[in-house]
Image (spheres, rainbow, N blue to C red):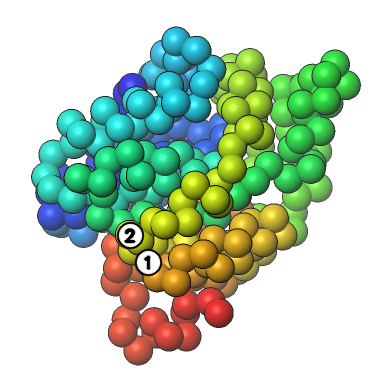
């Protein structure tokens, strides 16, 4: 698994997992806000960027790669950080490496595959619907415009799909559709921060509620004005949460109830 390191610090080490159609560059905007004592180890998940596809399309194969990356990471305890569907993979890796896991940061995460993504798994109809939506430039442009309420003018929700192997993205969608992202983590007692955009998908906000209902220690942070890509849309505000630099007087007000 390819890992790109941003920063040189070892006091705060973040293993960062991108979302559905991303790669390690997803975290470059956040890396601009890195404290001197921190580093981000941003992965290319199997099949993305510079990483080869997994030997078989099973969630265990993907998580095994993240576990190996965590165990080889420099420094001491690790914060597992994930964006979108990558947040679930970060949870899985943290659960498998209790000796390294210190905290989890989930950025605009889905706890389940919403119906508008499950459509793409409906046989030949779903296959063609996916390709119309994401595998051609006109479809991507139209989809991005139709999602204007879920983003800001700074972001493009479909741009990443121009550079992916679409058989890979569909394979990940099939895997995520088999995952229970809530129940298996009920007993997790690590510190957990969940940051999400004010304008994000309703399914993300519902997912945040589900996780907070089972994690009394979890803090949720709604990022004003941001949509589904807060790393690009609200980088400075997100960095305060990720690097735990939220002013003390703002903590109570920022944490969503």
- Residue bearing the label numbered 2: 190
In the rendered view, does 211 fall on the left or right side of 6?
right
Graded by Cα atoms within 10 Å as few (under 14), some (14 to 19) or many (20 or more), the crowding at tag 2 reads: some
- Residue bearing the label numbered 1: 241
In the rendered view, does 211 fall on the left or right side of 45?
right
State whether residue 39 is above or below residue 140.
Answer: below
Q: Residue 247: image x %, image y %?
A: 32, 81
Q: Residue 208: image x %, image y %?
A: 58, 62
Residue 26 visible from this viewpoint: no
Element marked by disc 2: loop
Q: Quadrant of residue 180?
A: top right
Q: Name the quadrant of the N terminus.
A: top left
Q: Quadrant of residue 238?
A: bottom left
State whether residue 96 is above or below residue 109.
Answer: above
Q: Residue at x 40, y 70 (%)?
A: 217
Residue 157 visible from this viewpoint: yes
Q: Residue 226: image x %, image y %?
A: 58, 63
The residues bearing labels 1 and 2 have C-alpha atoms spaced at a distance of 16 Å
Q: Residue at x 54, y 51 (%)?
A: 183
In the rendered view, does 195 fall on the left or right side of 208?
left
The residue closer to the viewer here, 255 or 133, is 255
């Amino acid at each position: 698994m390819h890992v790109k390191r941003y920063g040189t610090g070892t006091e705060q080490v973040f293993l960062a997992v991108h979302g559905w159609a991303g790669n390690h560059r997803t975290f470059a905007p956040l890396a601009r806000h890195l404290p001197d004592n921190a580093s981000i180890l941003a992965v290319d998940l199997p099949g993305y960027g510079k990483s080869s596809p997994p030997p078989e399309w099973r969630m265990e194969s993907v998580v095994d790669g993240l576990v190996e990356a965590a165990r080889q990471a420099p420094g001491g305890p690790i914060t597992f950080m994930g964006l979108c569907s990558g947040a679930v993979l970060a949870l899985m890796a943290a659960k498998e490496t209790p000796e390294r896991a210190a905290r989890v940061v989930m950025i605009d995460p889905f706890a389940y595959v919403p119906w508008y993504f499950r459509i793409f798994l409906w046989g030949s109809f779903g296959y063609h619907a996916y390709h119309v939506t994401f595998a051609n430039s006109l479809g991507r442009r139209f989809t991005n415009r139709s999602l204007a309420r879920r983003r800001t003018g700074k972001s493009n929700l479909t741009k990443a799909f121009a550079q992916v192997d679409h058989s890979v993205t569909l394979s990940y969608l099939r895997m995520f559709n088999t995952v229970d992202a809530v129940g298996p983590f009920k007993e997790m007692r690590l510190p957990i921060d969940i940051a999400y955009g004010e304008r994000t998908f309703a399914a993300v906000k519902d997912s945040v509620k589900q996780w907070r209902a089972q994690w009394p220690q979890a803090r949720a942070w709604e990022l004003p004005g941001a949509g589904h890509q807060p790393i690009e849309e609200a980088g400075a505000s997100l960095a305060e949460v990720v690097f735990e630099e939220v002013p003390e007087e703002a903590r109570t007000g920022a944490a969503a109830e």
